[in-house]
Image (cartoon, helix red, strand yellow):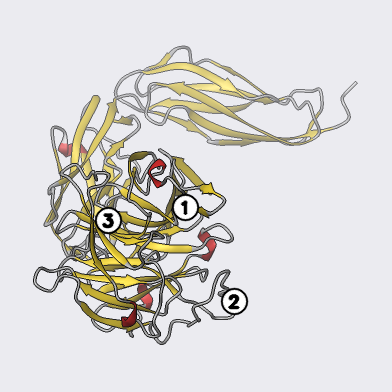
Amino acid sequence: MLLLMAGLLLPASVSYGQAGTFLGQVNFATDCGFTSSTGNRDGVGITFDGTNLWYSCYDSKDSDDSLHRDLFKANPKTGAVLGAWDIAGGIGALAYDATRNVIWAGEGGGPVVGWVIEIPLDANKNASSGSYTLAFQVPEAHSSPPISEDIVDGLAIDATTGTLYIHYDFATEFEMYSTNSGNFGSFLGYIQQAADIPRGTPVIPPHSGANGKCVLSGLAVGGSTIFQASDYCDHVWAVDKANPQNEQTANSFSITSSVPSGFDEKTLTCDTNTFSGFDAIWVKGVFTPQAFAFELAPGSCGVGGQPATTTPSATLSPTSVTFASQSVGTTSAPQTVTLTNSGGGALSISGITITGTNSGDYGETNNCGSSLAAGANCTINVTFSPAATGTRTAALTVTDNASGSPHTASLSGTGTSAAATLNPTSLTFAGQQLGTTSAPQTVTLSSTGITSLTISSIAITANFGETNNCGSSVAPGSTCTIGVTFAPTAPGTLTGSLQVSDNASGSPQTVSLSGTGLGPLAA
Protein backbone atom coordinates (compact mmCIF):
# COMPACT_ATOMS: atom_id res chain seq x y z
CA MET A 1 0.00 0.00 0.00
CA LEU A 2 1.21 3.55 -0.75
CA LEU A 3 0.51 6.71 1.21
CA LEU A 4 0.23 10.02 -0.65
CA MET A 5 2.06 12.74 1.27
CA ALA A 6 2.60 16.18 -0.31
CA GLY A 7 2.73 14.63 -3.76
CA LEU A 8 5.37 12.08 -2.81
CA LEU A 9 4.17 8.50 -2.86
CA LEU A 10 5.43 6.74 0.25
CA PRO A 11 5.13 3.12 1.39
CA ALA A 12 2.90 2.55 4.40
CA SER A 13 5.85 1.24 6.40
CA VAL A 14 9.59 1.07 5.96
CA SER A 15 12.02 -1.44 7.45
CA TYR A 16 15.01 0.64 8.50
CA GLY A 17 18.50 -0.49 7.56
CA GLN A 18 17.74 -2.73 4.55
CA ALA A 19 19.41 -1.56 1.34
CA GLY A 20 16.94 -1.58 -1.54
CA THR A 21 13.87 -0.92 0.61
CA PHE A 22 11.46 1.21 -1.44
CA LEU A 23 11.20 4.67 0.12
CA GLY A 24 9.03 6.62 -2.30
CA GLN A 25 8.17 7.79 -5.79
CA VAL A 26 7.91 11.31 -7.20
CA ASN A 27 5.97 12.28 -10.32
CA PHE A 28 7.37 15.41 -11.95
CA ALA A 29 4.80 18.02 -12.96
CA THR A 30 6.45 18.60 -16.36
CA ASP A 31 7.45 15.84 -18.75
CA CYS A 32 9.86 16.21 -21.64
CA GLY A 33 7.29 14.67 -23.97
CA PHE A 34 7.19 14.40 -27.74
CA THR A 35 7.79 17.58 -29.71
CA SER A 36 7.78 16.54 -33.38
CA SER A 37 7.68 13.61 -35.75
CA THR A 38 11.43 13.89 -36.26
CA GLY A 39 12.43 13.21 -32.71
CA ASN A 40 11.43 13.14 -29.08
CA ARG A 41 12.71 14.64 -25.88
CA ASP A 42 13.25 11.78 -23.49
CA GLY A 43 13.68 12.67 -19.83
CA VAL A 44 16.70 10.79 -18.54
CA GLY A 45 19.14 12.64 -16.25
CA ILE A 46 18.65 13.18 -12.53
CA THR A 47 20.75 14.72 -9.76
CA PHE A 48 20.18 16.05 -6.23
CA ASP A 49 21.74 19.29 -4.95
CA GLY A 50 20.95 18.81 -1.26
CA THR A 51 17.48 20.34 -1.57
CA ASN A 52 16.18 19.96 -5.14
CA LEU A 53 16.00 17.24 -7.74
CA TRP A 54 17.17 18.21 -11.24
CA TYR A 55 16.20 16.32 -14.38
CA SER A 56 17.01 16.72 -18.05
CA CYS A 57 15.68 16.25 -21.58
CA TYR A 58 17.68 15.09 -24.57
CA ASP A 59 17.21 14.25 -28.28
CA SER A 60 15.93 17.75 -28.99
CA LYS A 61 15.63 17.75 -32.79
CA ASP A 62 13.07 20.43 -33.44
CA SER A 63 13.75 23.24 -35.88
CA ASP A 64 13.33 25.75 -33.06
CA ASP A 65 14.90 24.20 -29.99
CA SER A 66 14.47 27.46 -28.05
CA LEU A 67 10.79 26.65 -27.68
CA HIS A 68 11.63 23.90 -25.24
CA ARG A 69 13.46 23.54 -21.97
CA ASP A 70 16.14 20.97 -21.33
CA LEU A 71 16.96 21.34 -17.62
CA PHE A 72 14.39 21.32 -14.81
CA LYS A 73 14.63 21.91 -11.07
CA ALA A 74 11.89 20.24 -9.03
CA ASN A 75 10.70 19.75 -5.47
CA PRO A 76 11.55 16.12 -4.57
CA LYS A 77 8.44 15.83 -2.37
CA THR A 78 5.82 17.31 -4.68
CA GLY A 79 7.31 17.03 -8.16
CA ALA A 80 6.50 20.72 -8.71
CA VAL A 81 8.85 22.35 -11.21
CA LEU A 82 10.73 25.25 -9.60
CA GLY A 83 12.69 26.34 -12.65
CA ALA A 84 13.38 25.41 -16.28
CA TRP A 85 16.28 26.36 -18.55
CA ASP A 86 17.23 25.92 -22.19
CA ILE A 87 20.49 24.15 -23.05
CA ALA A 88 20.97 24.11 -26.82
CA GLY A 89 20.84 20.61 -28.22
CA GLY A 90 19.42 19.00 -25.10
CA ILE A 91 21.30 17.24 -22.31
CA GLY A 92 21.45 13.75 -20.92
CA ALA A 93 23.06 12.54 -17.71
CA LEU A 94 23.50 14.99 -14.80
CA ALA A 95 25.82 15.19 -11.78
CA TYR A 96 25.70 17.96 -9.16
CA ASP A 97 29.16 18.96 -7.88
CA ALA A 98 28.85 20.29 -4.32
CA THR A 99 32.46 21.51 -4.24
CA ARG A 100 32.02 23.85 -7.23
CA ASN A 101 28.22 24.35 -7.03
CA VAL A 102 27.85 23.36 -10.67
CA ILE A 103 25.95 20.70 -12.57
CA TRP A 104 27.96 18.56 -14.96
CA ALA A 105 25.82 17.39 -17.87
CA GLY A 106 26.34 15.07 -20.79
CA GLU A 107 25.54 16.40 -24.25
CA GLY A 108 22.40 14.64 -25.38
CA GLY A 109 21.55 14.74 -29.04
CA GLY A 110 22.86 18.02 -30.38
CA PRO A 111 25.15 18.61 -33.34
CA VAL A 112 28.33 17.47 -31.54
CA VAL A 113 28.75 14.16 -29.78
CA GLY A 114 30.33 13.44 -26.42
CA TRP A 115 30.65 16.89 -24.87
CA VAL A 116 30.68 17.42 -21.10
CA ILE A 117 28.76 20.60 -20.24
CA GLU A 118 29.39 22.69 -17.11
CA ILE A 119 26.31 24.54 -15.80
CA PRO A 120 27.03 26.99 -12.94
CA LEU A 121 24.43 27.59 -10.23
CA ASP A 122 23.95 30.68 -8.09
CA ALA A 123 23.64 30.79 -4.31
CA ASN A 124 19.93 29.91 -4.57
CA LYS A 125 20.68 26.85 -6.70
CA ASN A 126 19.35 28.37 -9.91
CA ALA A 127 20.83 28.07 -13.38
CA SER A 128 20.66 30.64 -16.18
CA SER A 129 19.59 29.85 -19.74
CA GLY A 130 22.59 30.28 -22.01
CA SER A 131 25.00 30.38 -19.07
CA TYR A 132 26.87 27.14 -19.57
CA THR A 133 30.17 25.97 -20.99
CA LEU A 134 31.12 23.16 -23.32
CA ALA A 135 33.78 22.04 -20.86
CA PHE A 136 35.55 19.31 -22.81
CA GLN A 137 34.83 16.67 -25.41
CA VAL A 138 35.26 13.01 -24.60
CA PRO A 139 37.30 11.26 -27.31
CA GLU A 140 35.52 8.15 -28.51
CA ALA A 141 38.80 6.28 -28.98
CA HIS A 142 39.25 5.84 -25.23
CA SER A 143 36.44 3.31 -24.97
CA SER A 144 37.01 -0.32 -25.79
CA PRO A 145 35.57 -1.04 -28.27
CA PRO A 146 35.15 2.58 -29.49
CA ILE A 147 31.64 3.92 -28.92
CA SER A 148 29.94 6.83 -30.65
CA GLU A 149 27.09 7.54 -28.28
CA ASP A 150 25.78 10.60 -26.49
CA ILE A 151 26.50 10.93 -22.77
CA VAL A 152 22.95 10.23 -21.72
CA ASP A 153 23.16 7.34 -19.31
CA GLY A 154 25.79 7.81 -16.63
CA LEU A 155 27.58 10.77 -15.06
CA ALA A 156 28.89 10.97 -11.50
CA ILE A 157 31.34 13.31 -9.78
CA ASP A 158 33.71 12.45 -6.94
CA ALA A 159 33.99 15.89 -5.37
CA THR A 160 36.91 14.84 -3.15
CA THR A 161 39.19 13.97 -6.08
CA GLY A 162 37.57 15.94 -8.90
CA THR A 163 37.11 12.76 -10.91
CA LEU A 164 34.16 12.69 -13.29
CA TYR A 165 32.84 9.22 -14.11
CA ILE A 166 31.16 8.88 -17.52
CA HIS A 167 29.11 6.07 -18.97
CA TYR A 168 27.82 5.89 -22.53
CA ASP A 169 24.52 4.42 -23.65
CA PHE A 170 24.60 0.59 -23.78
CA ALA A 171 28.32 0.29 -22.91
CA THR A 172 29.88 -2.24 -20.53
CA GLU A 173 32.49 0.08 -19.01
CA PHE A 174 32.75 3.62 -17.67
CA GLU A 175 35.49 6.20 -18.13
CA MET A 176 37.17 8.64 -15.75
CA TYR A 177 38.14 12.26 -16.48
CA SER A 178 39.69 15.00 -14.37
CA THR A 179 37.86 18.25 -13.59
CA ASN A 180 40.82 19.70 -11.69
CA SER A 181 42.74 22.74 -12.92
CA GLY A 182 46.01 21.84 -14.57
CA ASN A 183 44.71 18.64 -16.14
CA PHE A 184 41.09 19.62 -16.75
CA GLY A 185 39.42 17.19 -19.14
CA SER A 186 42.29 14.70 -18.99
CA PHE A 187 41.43 11.06 -19.52
CA LEU A 188 42.28 9.03 -16.40
CA GLY A 189 41.30 5.56 -17.60
CA TYR A 190 38.29 3.32 -17.97
CA ILE A 191 36.91 0.49 -15.86
CA GLN A 192 35.20 -2.62 -17.15
CA GLN A 193 31.91 -3.79 -15.70
CA ALA A 194 32.45 -5.99 -12.65
CA ALA A 195 32.85 -9.64 -13.58
CA ASP A 196 30.04 -10.88 -11.37
CA ILE A 197 27.50 -8.48 -12.89
CA PRO A 198 25.56 -10.26 -15.71
CA ARG A 199 27.05 -8.89 -18.88
CA GLY A 200 25.32 -8.01 -22.11
CA THR A 201 26.22 -6.50 -25.45
CA PRO A 202 25.61 -2.97 -26.76
CA VAL A 203 22.32 -3.66 -28.50
CA ILE A 204 19.26 -1.55 -29.09
CA PRO A 205 16.43 -2.02 -26.53
CA PRO A 206 14.29 -3.65 -25.49
CA HIS A 207 16.84 -5.55 -23.45
CA SER A 208 15.84 -8.48 -21.28
CA GLY A 209 17.15 -9.32 -17.85
CA ALA A 210 15.67 -12.79 -18.08
CA ASN A 211 18.58 -14.15 -20.12
CA GLY A 212 21.22 -12.53 -17.94
CA LYS A 213 22.05 -9.82 -20.48
CA CYS A 214 22.62 -6.48 -18.78
CA VAL A 215 24.53 -3.34 -19.69
CA LEU A 216 25.39 -0.41 -17.45
CA SER A 217 23.42 2.82 -17.45
CA GLY A 218 23.36 5.30 -14.54
CA LEU A 219 26.21 6.06 -12.15
CA ALA A 220 26.42 7.60 -8.68
CA VAL A 221 29.34 8.04 -6.29
CA GLY A 222 28.96 7.78 -2.53
CA GLY A 223 32.06 7.72 -0.36
CA SER A 224 33.98 4.56 -1.22
CA THR A 225 31.18 3.21 -3.41
CA ILE A 226 30.20 3.52 -7.07
CA PHE A 227 26.55 2.72 -7.77
CA GLN A 228 25.60 1.42 -11.21
CA ALA A 229 22.18 0.99 -12.78
CA SER A 230 21.41 -1.39 -15.66
CA ASP A 231 19.28 -1.02 -18.77
CA TYR A 232 16.06 -3.05 -18.33
CA CYS A 233 17.58 -5.39 -15.75
CA ASP A 234 15.87 -3.65 -12.80
CA HIS A 235 18.96 -3.76 -10.62
CA VAL A 236 21.38 -1.41 -8.88
CA TRP A 237 24.90 -2.68 -8.26
CA ALA A 238 27.35 -1.23 -5.74
CA VAL A 239 31.09 -1.70 -6.33
CA ASP A 240 34.25 -0.53 -4.56
CA LYS A 241 35.50 2.76 -5.94
CA ALA A 242 39.09 1.69 -5.33
CA ASN A 243 38.54 -1.70 -6.95
CA PRO A 244 35.38 -1.63 -9.11
CA GLN A 245 35.69 -5.34 -9.87
CA ASN A 246 34.54 -6.03 -6.29
CA GLU A 247 30.78 -5.88 -5.83
CA GLN A 248 29.40 -4.69 -2.49
CA THR A 249 26.55 -7.15 -2.22
CA ALA A 250 25.14 -5.49 0.92
CA ASN A 251 24.32 -2.35 -1.08
CA SER A 252 23.29 -4.05 -4.34
CA PHE A 253 19.59 -4.66 -4.83
CA SER A 254 16.79 -5.39 -7.26
CA ILE A 255 14.08 -2.81 -7.98
CA THR A 256 11.74 -5.16 -9.87
CA SER A 257 8.95 -5.28 -7.30
CA SER A 258 8.82 -1.49 -6.80
CA VAL A 259 8.72 -0.04 -10.33
CA PRO A 260 6.10 -0.30 -13.09
CA SER A 261 6.38 -2.98 -15.72
CA GLY A 262 8.56 -1.78 -18.58
CA PHE A 263 10.39 0.79 -16.46
CA ASP A 264 13.77 1.52 -18.09
CA GLU A 265 16.15 2.59 -15.33
CA LYS A 266 18.73 5.09 -16.51
CA THR A 267 20.33 7.53 -14.09
CA LEU A 268 21.06 7.60 -10.36
CA THR A 269 21.68 10.19 -7.65
CA CYS A 270 22.32 10.09 -3.89
CA ASP A 271 19.99 11.88 -1.45
CA THR A 272 20.57 12.09 2.30
CA ASN A 273 18.01 14.81 3.08
CA THR A 274 14.57 14.15 1.56
CA PHE A 275 13.73 11.06 3.62
CA SER A 276 14.32 11.87 7.27
CA GLY A 277 16.57 9.26 8.84
CA PHE A 278 17.43 7.53 5.57
CA ASP A 279 20.22 7.57 3.00
CA ALA A 280 18.54 7.13 -0.38
CA ILE A 281 19.36 6.69 -4.03
CA TRP A 282 16.99 7.94 -6.73
CA VAL A 283 16.52 5.89 -9.91
CA LYS A 284 15.23 7.88 -12.91
CA GLY A 285 13.68 6.16 -15.90
CA VAL A 286 13.63 7.22 -19.53
CA PHE A 287 10.29 7.85 -21.30
CA THR A 288 8.66 8.68 -17.95
CA PRO A 289 8.41 11.73 -15.65
CA GLN A 290 8.99 9.51 -12.61
CA ALA A 291 11.79 8.72 -10.21
CA PHE A 292 11.91 6.07 -7.49
CA ALA A 293 13.90 6.25 -4.24
CA PHE A 294 15.46 3.28 -2.46
CA GLU A 295 17.18 2.99 0.88
CA LEU A 296 20.95 2.59 1.21
CA ALA A 297 22.98 1.50 4.21
CA PRO A 298 23.69 4.49 6.47
CA GLY A 299 26.89 6.31 5.59
CA SER A 300 27.17 4.86 2.09
CA CYS A 301 26.15 7.88 0.03
CA GLY A 302 26.88 11.61 -0.01
CA VAL A 303 25.31 14.59 -1.80
CA GLY A 304 27.02 16.21 -4.76
CA GLY A 305 29.91 13.77 -4.83
CA GLN A 306 30.89 14.58 -1.26
CA PRO A 307 32.04 11.83 1.09
CA ALA A 308 29.37 9.85 2.86
CA THR A 309 28.79 11.13 6.35
CA THR A 310 30.57 9.32 9.19
CA THR A 311 28.88 11.32 11.93
CA PRO A 312 25.89 10.09 13.95
CA SER A 313 22.43 11.59 13.64
CA ALA A 314 19.86 11.09 16.39
CA THR A 315 16.08 11.29 16.16
CA LEU A 316 13.31 10.49 18.62
CA SER A 317 9.94 9.23 17.43
CA PRO A 318 7.42 10.35 18.38
CA THR A 319 8.60 13.75 19.60
CA SER A 320 5.47 14.25 21.70
CA VAL A 321 3.81 11.71 24.03
CA THR A 322 0.40 12.29 25.64
CA PHE A 323 -0.95 10.00 28.35
CA ALA A 324 -4.62 9.44 29.19
CA SER A 325 -5.94 10.69 32.53
CA GLN A 326 -4.33 8.73 35.33
CA SER A 327 -5.38 8.48 38.98
CA VAL A 328 -2.98 10.09 41.43
CA GLY A 329 -0.65 7.52 42.94
CA THR A 330 -1.12 4.95 40.16
CA THR A 331 1.13 4.12 37.19
CA SER A 332 0.08 4.01 33.56
CA ALA A 333 0.96 1.42 30.96
CA PRO A 334 4.22 2.34 29.19
CA GLN A 335 4.36 4.24 25.92
CA THR A 336 7.31 3.66 23.59
CA VAL A 337 9.69 6.25 22.13
CA THR A 338 12.20 5.05 19.53
CA LEU A 339 15.72 6.48 19.34
CA THR A 340 17.24 6.07 15.85
CA ASN A 341 20.79 6.73 14.67
CA SER A 342 20.36 7.61 11.00
CA GLY A 343 23.93 8.83 10.57
CA GLY A 344 27.05 7.08 9.36
CA GLY A 345 28.87 6.82 12.69
CA ALA A 346 28.20 5.37 16.14
CA LEU A 347 25.98 7.38 18.48
CA SER A 348 27.48 7.72 21.97
CA ILE A 349 24.74 8.10 24.58
CA SER A 350 25.77 9.87 27.76
CA GLY A 351 22.35 10.08 29.36
CA ILE A 352 18.63 9.30 29.06
CA THR A 353 16.68 11.25 31.67
CA ILE A 354 13.32 12.82 32.47
CA THR A 355 13.55 16.58 32.81
CA GLY A 356 11.13 19.47 33.17
CA THR A 357 8.48 20.83 35.51
CA ASN A 358 6.92 17.53 36.65
CA SER A 359 9.85 15.22 35.93
CA GLY A 360 9.11 13.18 39.05
CA ASP A 361 5.75 12.11 37.61
CA TYR A 362 7.37 10.13 34.79
CA GLY A 363 9.69 7.16 34.60
CA GLU A 364 11.62 5.43 31.83
CA THR A 365 13.37 2.18 31.04
CA ASN A 366 15.39 1.54 27.88
CA ASN A 367 17.54 -0.95 26.00
CA CYS A 368 19.83 1.64 24.40
CA GLY A 369 23.07 1.15 26.30
CA SER A 370 25.90 3.63 25.90
CA SER A 371 26.36 3.33 22.12
CA LEU A 372 24.05 2.92 19.13
CA ALA A 373 25.50 1.73 15.83
CA ALA A 374 24.90 3.56 12.54
CA GLY A 375 21.45 2.67 11.23
CA ALA A 376 20.36 1.07 14.51
CA ASN A 377 17.56 2.01 16.89
CA CYS A 378 16.53 1.30 20.46
CA THR A 379 13.38 1.76 22.52
CA ILE A 380 12.61 3.87 25.57
CA ASN A 381 9.48 2.98 27.57
CA VAL A 382 7.94 5.91 29.45
CA THR A 383 5.33 5.63 32.23
CA PHE A 384 3.15 8.27 33.93
CA SER A 385 2.55 8.31 37.71
CA PRO A 386 0.92 11.64 38.61
CA ALA A 387 1.70 13.00 42.05
CA ALA A 388 -1.12 15.54 41.90
CA THR A 389 -4.21 16.36 39.91
CA GLY A 390 -4.22 18.48 36.78
CA THR A 391 -1.97 18.70 33.74
CA ARG A 392 1.53 17.33 34.35
CA THR A 393 4.35 18.03 31.87
CA ALA A 394 7.96 16.96 31.46
CA ALA A 395 10.40 15.92 28.75
CA LEU A 396 12.30 12.79 27.82
CA THR A 397 15.88 13.97 27.24
CA VAL A 398 18.62 12.07 25.43
CA THR A 399 22.13 13.48 25.62
CA ASP A 400 24.52 12.19 22.95
CA ASN A 401 27.30 13.13 20.51
CA ALA A 402 25.01 13.94 17.56
CA SER A 403 24.23 17.40 16.29
CA GLY A 404 21.30 18.99 18.14
CA SER A 405 21.96 17.21 21.44
CA PRO A 406 20.16 16.99 23.77
CA HIS A 407 17.25 15.48 21.86
CA THR A 408 13.87 15.69 23.55
CA ALA A 409 10.33 14.36 23.39
CA SER A 410 7.66 16.30 25.27
CA LEU A 411 5.56 14.42 27.85
CA SER A 412 2.07 15.35 28.99
CA GLY A 413 -0.65 13.75 31.08
CA THR A 414 -3.47 14.63 33.46
CA GLY A 415 -3.62 13.49 37.06
CA THR A 416 -7.03 12.78 38.47
CA SER A 417 -7.98 11.95 42.05
CA ALA A 418 -11.07 9.94 41.20
CA ALA A 419 -10.75 6.21 40.57
CA ALA A 420 -13.26 3.54 39.63
CA THR A 421 -13.46 -0.23 39.32
CA LEU A 422 -16.20 -2.53 38.04
CA ASN A 423 -16.59 -6.05 39.37
CA PRO A 424 -16.96 -8.40 37.62
CA THR A 425 -15.64 -7.17 34.24
CA SER A 426 -17.62 -9.75 32.26
CA LEU A 427 -21.05 -11.39 32.53
CA THR A 428 -22.36 -14.49 30.78
CA PHE A 429 -26.09 -15.29 30.74
CA ALA A 430 -27.55 -18.74 30.34
CA GLY A 431 -29.80 -19.54 27.37
CA GLN A 432 -32.85 -17.29 27.42
CA GLN A 433 -36.11 -17.72 25.48
CA LEU A 434 -36.71 -15.06 22.86
CA GLY A 435 -39.12 -12.39 24.05
CA THR A 436 -38.39 -12.98 27.75
CA THR A 437 -36.09 -11.26 30.22
CA SER A 438 -33.58 -12.97 32.49
CA ALA A 439 -33.10 -12.46 36.19
CA PRO A 440 -30.62 -9.62 36.83
CA GLN A 441 -26.93 -10.16 37.49
CA THR A 442 -25.14 -7.62 39.65
CA VAL A 443 -22.11 -5.47 38.78
CA THR A 444 -20.53 -3.42 41.56
CA LEU A 445 -19.07 0.02 40.82
CA SER A 446 -16.50 1.10 43.44
CA SER A 447 -15.11 4.59 43.98
CA THR A 448 -11.52 3.85 45.00
CA GLY A 449 -10.00 7.33 44.68
CA ILE A 450 -9.60 10.16 47.15
CA THR A 451 -12.34 12.35 45.68
CA SER A 452 -15.89 11.64 44.56
CA LEU A 453 -16.47 9.68 41.39
CA THR A 454 -18.65 11.76 39.06
CA ILE A 455 -20.78 9.65 36.71
CA SER A 456 -21.77 11.19 33.40
CA SER A 457 -23.56 8.14 31.94
CA ILE A 458 -24.22 4.42 32.27
CA ALA A 459 -24.95 2.85 28.88
CA ILE A 460 -25.72 -0.66 27.69
CA THR A 461 -26.06 -2.22 24.23
CA ALA A 462 -29.10 -3.88 22.61
CA ASN A 463 -30.44 -7.20 23.97
CA PHE A 464 -29.33 -6.20 27.47
CA GLY A 465 -30.82 -3.87 30.07
CA GLU A 466 -29.69 -2.23 33.30
CA THR A 467 -30.96 -0.51 36.41
CA ASN A 468 -28.72 1.10 39.05
CA ASN A 469 -28.65 3.01 42.31
CA CYS A 470 -25.49 4.99 41.53
CA GLY A 471 -26.87 8.45 40.95
CA SER A 472 -24.56 11.13 39.59
CA SER A 473 -21.68 10.58 42.01
CA VAL A 474 -20.20 8.00 44.36
CA ALA A 475 -18.29 9.10 47.46
CA PRO A 476 -14.69 7.94 48.03
CA GLY A 477 -14.64 4.41 49.42
CA SER A 478 -18.30 3.82 48.54
CA THR A 479 -19.98 1.51 46.05
CA CYS A 480 -23.16 1.24 44.05
CA THR A 481 -24.76 -1.61 42.14
CA ILE A 482 -25.90 -2.06 38.57
CA GLY A 483 -28.39 -4.82 37.77
CA VAL A 484 -27.97 -6.22 34.26
CA THR A 485 -30.62 -8.30 32.47
CA PHE A 486 -30.65 -10.23 29.19
CA ALA A 487 -33.66 -9.98 26.81
CA PRO A 488 -32.68 -11.64 23.52
CA THR A 489 -34.41 -10.59 20.30
CA ALA A 490 -32.70 -13.14 18.06
CA PRO A 491 -31.53 -16.73 18.42
CA GLY A 492 -27.86 -17.59 18.89
CA THR A 493 -24.97 -16.01 20.75
CA LEU A 494 -25.44 -12.30 21.43
CA THR A 495 -22.78 -9.98 22.82
CA GLY A 496 -22.68 -6.44 24.12
CA SER A 497 -21.18 -4.20 26.76
CA LEU A 498 -21.99 -2.09 29.80
CA GLN A 499 -20.10 1.22 29.87
CA VAL A 500 -19.72 3.67 32.75
CA SER A 501 -18.42 7.11 31.77
CA ASP A 502 -16.97 9.12 34.64
CA ASN A 503 -14.11 11.36 35.76
CA ALA A 504 -11.75 8.52 36.66
CA SER A 505 -8.73 7.44 34.65
CA GLY A 506 -9.51 4.76 32.11
CA SER A 507 -13.05 6.06 31.51
CA PRO A 508 -15.26 4.61 30.23
CA GLN A 509 -15.08 1.53 32.42
CA THR A 510 -16.48 -1.50 30.59
CA VAL A 511 -18.07 -4.87 31.34
CA SER A 512 -18.35 -7.33 28.46
CA LEU A 513 -21.71 -9.12 28.13
CA SER A 514 -22.77 -12.29 26.37
CA GLY A 515 -25.78 -14.60 26.28
CA THR A 516 -27.61 -17.09 24.08
CA GLY A 517 -31.06 -16.47 22.64
CA LEU A 518 -33.35 -19.50 22.36
CA GLY A 519 -36.16 -19.51 19.79
CA PRO A 520 -38.89 -19.38 18.78
CA LEU A 521 -40.46 -16.30 20.37
CA ALA A 522 -42.43 -17.05 23.51
CA ALA A 523 -46.20 -16.88 23.09
Looking at this view, name the residue that lies furthest to the right: 523
Is 113 placed left or right of 312 in the picture? right
- N-terminal of the two: label 1 or label 3? 1
Residue 210 — which label? 2
**Kind of residue at disc 2:** Ala
Residue at 20% in and 48% down: 121
Q: Are marks 1 and 3 in contact (CB under 8 Å)?
A: no
Looking at this view, name the residue that lies furthest to the top: 472
Q: Nearer the viewer, residue 368 or 16?
A: 16
Q: Nearer the viewer, residue 491 or 118?
A: 118
Percent coordinates x, y for residue 439 in the rendering? 70, 25
**Kind of residue at disc 3:** Thr
Is 350 placed left or right of 86 in the picture? left
Instruction: Give the residue number, with chain letter if any, for mark 3.
Output: 272
Where 51 sits versus 208, above or below?
Answer: above
Instruction: Give the residue number, with chain letter if any, for mark 1.
Output: 41
**Kind of residue at disc 1:** Arg
- N-terminal of the two: label 2 or label 3? 2
Residue at 17% in and 45% down: 122
